Amino acid sequence: MSVSLEGIRQARKRIEGSIYFSPAPQSEALSRMTGQQVYLKLDNLQRTGAFKERGALNKILTLSDAEKARGVIAASAGNHAQAVAYHATAHGLRARIVMPLMTPLVKTAATAGYGAEVVLHGANYDEAYAEALRLAEQDGMTFLHPFDDDVVMEGQGTIGLELLEQVPGLEAVVVPIGGGGLISGVACAIKESNPGIRVIGVQTERLPSMLRAVEAGEPVTIPAEATVADGIAVRRAGERTLPMVQRYVDELVKVDEEEIAQAILVLLEREKTLAEGAGAVALAALLQGKASLKGQRTAVLVCGGNIDVSLLARIIERGLVKDGRRTRVRVHLTDRPGALHGLTRILTDLRANIVQTAHDRTHYGVSLGDTVIDITLETRGDEHIEEIRRRLKESGYKHERID
């Protein structure tokens, strides 16, 4: 393996001044929730919203003049794309990025906005990757791999060096894994500096490509799956990253979609920090007690914040329902003047705020002369919801909860 602590140190000197030294504050709220001493490494605050700038810039700065002159091309679901686009343009290089067709609009628009030519191709990263390799060969451009590259890994490893300075007495680091470039660099920097610090990798349950590679002893291609953590939706671990993970990573765990969504909401509500799915998986593992950590001083990487606003809206809505802060009740009423007034009076007395209503006189088994109203309410939790339902029942209203 040619990735080394010295290489990571050189990468830090090389990119210093162009990459934001992201903060790693301790979170009192998350420390209480997890039983750890939690420090959040906020690389979602980088210029393009993710850690990928570190590896992309390190790679660009080490290209030969001939490689730069041919222009650069990359395949990415979003964050590597923006990083390459931004830093290639800043250094006067032509950049072309191949992105999967289903890449969130926020990422494709940002990539084009940073000066790159965007090519949408394929249903997933692997198909976009194959197209990028074809175009690189066809047009003679220099291909920049998002993770399976030693120079890229060393750029990502600069996060590890920063954490060693920012978190005195650091005992554990929890890192998201897609193809493995981030955790490979970070783990190398951490373990070569202090072998006693634990490194835990986190993958989405739907695409645990690195976990499967470790189990098989070699990279394996797993079936494509849609995931809220699109930034780590990689079907095959890297040939170069796998040996790094085998050597330096202590534990690999998985989190599911609901756990990731909850972590996004916790970061937003408790820490006022916006994370995309891939950027929240490390915290999700900690919140769910997936990693074998007990009270350690732990750094959690929030590695990206480029989330599609429509997806974020759905996550927030579902989170409110799950927490009992929003509910929907279907109530049967007689279709006569004043019937709705009696219902709203009960809701007013119980201080439940009406968000939306919808009448239906035809469906849901409604009798002639009756109507059904669906009411979406802002509530204060499950006990408040049960209080509302109890009062409706006592008042003779036939109803059901339809969350």
Image: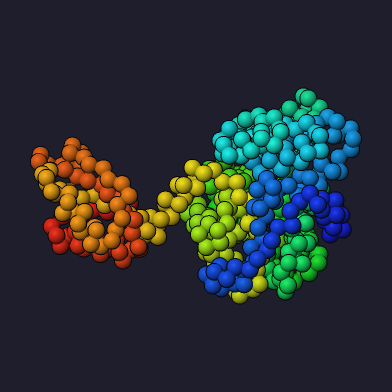
- Left or right: 356, with 345 as reference point: right
| Position of residue 402 measured from the top left corner of the image (x, y, whole percent) | 29, 50
Q: How is the image coloured?
A: rainbow
Residue at horizontal 20 percent and vertical 59 percent from the top = 346
Q: Which of the 4 image quarters holds residue 139? A: top right
Residue at the extreme top? 138
Does 356 appear above or below 162? above
Taking the image as shown, residue 399 lies to the left or right of residue 121, namely: left
Q: Which residue: 42% across, 50% down?
A: 317
| 284 or 244, nearer to the observer | 284
Quarter where residue 88 is shown: top right
| Residue that sits furthest to the right in the current view | 65
Q: Quadrant of residue 109?
A: top right
Name the spot of residue 274 as percent of width and height, x first: 57, 53
For the question of whether residue 119 can be seen, the reply is yes
Compared with 14, 171 (above or below) is below
The location of residue 337, given as percent across then percent down, is 11, 45
Asked if residue 124 lies left or right of residue 184, the reply is left
* Residue 3 visible, this orientation: no
Measured from the top left, where is residue 204 in percent x and y?
A: 57, 52
The residue under the point 72% across, 50% down is 181
User: Which residue is painted at 81% across and 67% down in the image?
Assistant: 193
